[in-house]
């Protein structure tokens, strides 16, 4: 599944691409309009099924995915440089803020912040609504429900532990949901960073 953003209109189109004798033909499926890449990929796969372009195969042995299409969507779901992250970073940069991307606040701790302000010690995480269990938008899966419930709860516990460990090390943690207005999120982060800089200079 391939997603293309039209440069003029910013509309997103879904294409089914496959390998055929060394070539890589593609079939246009339609326009998708969801907020996240995962949701747009899922919509693309749904279109392909409805157009009769796919056939069902049994999942690979030991796979947690309930179907090949689910497995393909999860493989294609980016864990960094998502649209909400890119938009937020662009807005922060326009406000004159400089930061690191995809960096560890604590080198010894395997937790990576999406946006990091090292000097004021501020770590920003942009959390996906599904993977991090957004109370407003989480819709539990009807297939393998227990597996996904356990995985999401594990992510929530990891997030809480990350917040605690960074807080104990003197870091301020800011969490942004992917559904939040990026302008509002930028203003919130900017306020925290500017205040930290004023506090540091006395």
Image (cartoon, rainbow, N blue to C red):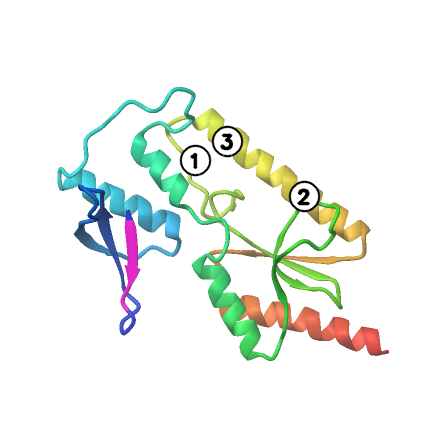
The residue pinned by badge 2 equals 160
Q: Residue furthest front?
A: 22
Instruction: Tell me whether circle 3 and circle 2 mark residues in contact (CB < 8 Å).
Output: no
Image position of 125 (left or right of 33): right
The residue pinned by badge 3 equals 149
Q: Secondary structure beneath disc 2?
A: helix
Image position of 94 (left or right of 99): left
Q: Residue furthest right?
A: 202
Q: Can I make out residue 95 in this image?
A: yes
Q: Secondary structure beneath disc 3?
A: helix
Give the image location of residue 77, x and y in percent: 42, 46
Q: Which stretch appears magenta? A: 2-6
At 30% from the left edge and 55% from the top edge, which residue is drawn?
Answer: 3
Residue at mark 1 to residue at mark 3: CA–CA distance? 7 Å
The residue pinned by badge 1 equals 140
At 29% from the left edge and 59% from the top edge, which residue is drawn?
Answer: 4
């Amino acid at each position: 599944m391939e997603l293309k953003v039209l440069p003029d209109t910013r509309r997103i189109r879904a294409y089914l691409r496959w390998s055929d004798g060394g070539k890589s033909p593609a079939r246009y499926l339609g326009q998708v309009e969801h907020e996240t890449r995962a949701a747009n990929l899922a919509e693309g796969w749904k279109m392909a099924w409805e157009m009769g372009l796919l056939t069902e195969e049994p999942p690979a042995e030991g796979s947690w995915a309930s179907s090949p299409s689910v497995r393909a969507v999860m493989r294609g779901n980016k864990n960094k440089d998502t649209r909400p992250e890119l938009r937020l970073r662009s807005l922060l940069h326009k406000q004159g803020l400089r930061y690191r991307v995809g960096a560890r606040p604590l080198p010894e701790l395997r937790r990576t912040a999406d946006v990091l302000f090292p000097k004021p010690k501020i770590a920003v995480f942009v959390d996906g609504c599904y993977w991090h269990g957004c109370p407003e938008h989480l819709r539990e899966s009807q297939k393998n429900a227990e597996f996904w419930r356990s995985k999401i709860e594990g992510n929530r516990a990891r997030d809480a532990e990350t917040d605690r460990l960074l807080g104990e090390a003197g870091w301020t943690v800011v969490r942004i949901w992917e559904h939040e207005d990026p302008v509002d999120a930028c203003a919130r982060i900017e306020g925290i960073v500017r205040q930290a800089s004023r506090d540091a200079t006395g």
